[in-house]
Amino acid sequence: MQINLRAEWQSILSDEIQQSYFQDLIKTVDQEYKNHTCYPPKELIFAAFNNCSFKDLKVVIIGQDPYHGKGEANGLCFSVNDGVKIPPSLRNIFREMCDDLDILLFPATGNLESWAKQGVLLLNASLTVQEDNPNSHKHLKWNVFTDAVIQKISDEKQNVVFLLWGNFAHKKGLKIDRNKHLILESGHPSPMSANQGKWFGNKHFSKTNEYLKEKGICPVEWNSDHYQ
């Protein structure tokens, strides 16, 4: 399987992608796509990187694995393709965003590509999944790769905001250098967590932009270009 990864990231992650575990991972993923229906489409497996340059990266959001329904996953965590019904977790993300930033009109699309283009890395811990089988690629070594990505960002960047939503993301971010970066943690935006009072009111969107402004970095325009 060809690794569709932009040259900038290939250079930054060259040591990682040359390791035997990664080569074995790619071969296994290729077989999974041949033997099962998997998401996202092959060409979008590395979309989180291809839509967000390392140079401009300023925010990292960590998800668990791609959506497992037909036509949903587009390679960006929490994001779905245009025209797809907004999933419950993303709807709660948008609700918090609108409340936090006093946005009156709810986004009409769940496609978060506009965030990625501004320097928000929307990184799933596992970059692939079998159809209708959540966490089905958890046993593969995507976690090793994405842990290395997070470590590389922590080591080589400064003043990045890491948004860690839920216990899984909290654990994923344990090695981030908190002296160089801002880490914002809350419960997961899934309905179960959100309805227990662990999500709403975290104000992560305004806190992120306040921090970026303090550091002289252009804030994120969280509001989508499309409204309903």
Image (cartoon, grey):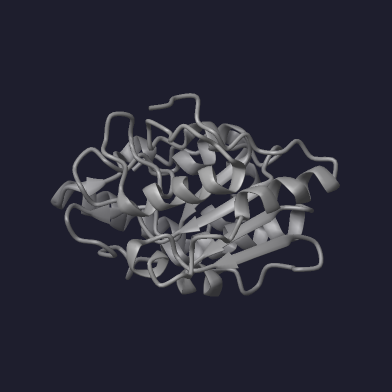
Q: How many marks?
A: 0
**Which residue appears at 52% of the width and 31% of the height?**
114
Percent x, y of residue 59: 64, 49
**Relative vertical location of residue 173 with respect to residue 18 in this rendering, above or below:** below
**Relative vertical location of residue 128 with respect to residue 85 in this rendering, above or below:** below
**Relative vertical location of residue 115 with respect to residue 123 in this rendering, above or below:** above
Q: Can residue 6 be spotted in the picture? A: no
**Residue 226, quarter of the rendered image:** top left
Percent x, y of residue 186: 55, 67
Percent x, y of residue 195: 38, 67
**Residue 183, quarter of the rendered image:** bottom right
Closer to us: 20 or 221: 221
- Image check: 64 left or right of 210? left
Closer to us: 223 or 144: 223
- Image check: 75 left or right of 13? left
Closer to us: 127 or 27: 127
**Which residue appears at 61% of the width and 55% of the height?**
204
**Residue 111, quarter of the rendered image:** top left
Quadrant in which the N terminus is drawn: top left
- Image check: 130 left or right of 114? left
**Which residue appears at 76% of the width and 48% of the height?**
210
Quadrant in which the C terminus is drawn: top left
Q: Can residue 146 be spotted in the picture? A: yes
Percent x, y of residue 72: 27, 41
Closer to us: 150 or 63: 63
**Which residue appears at 46% of the width and 62% of the height?**
20
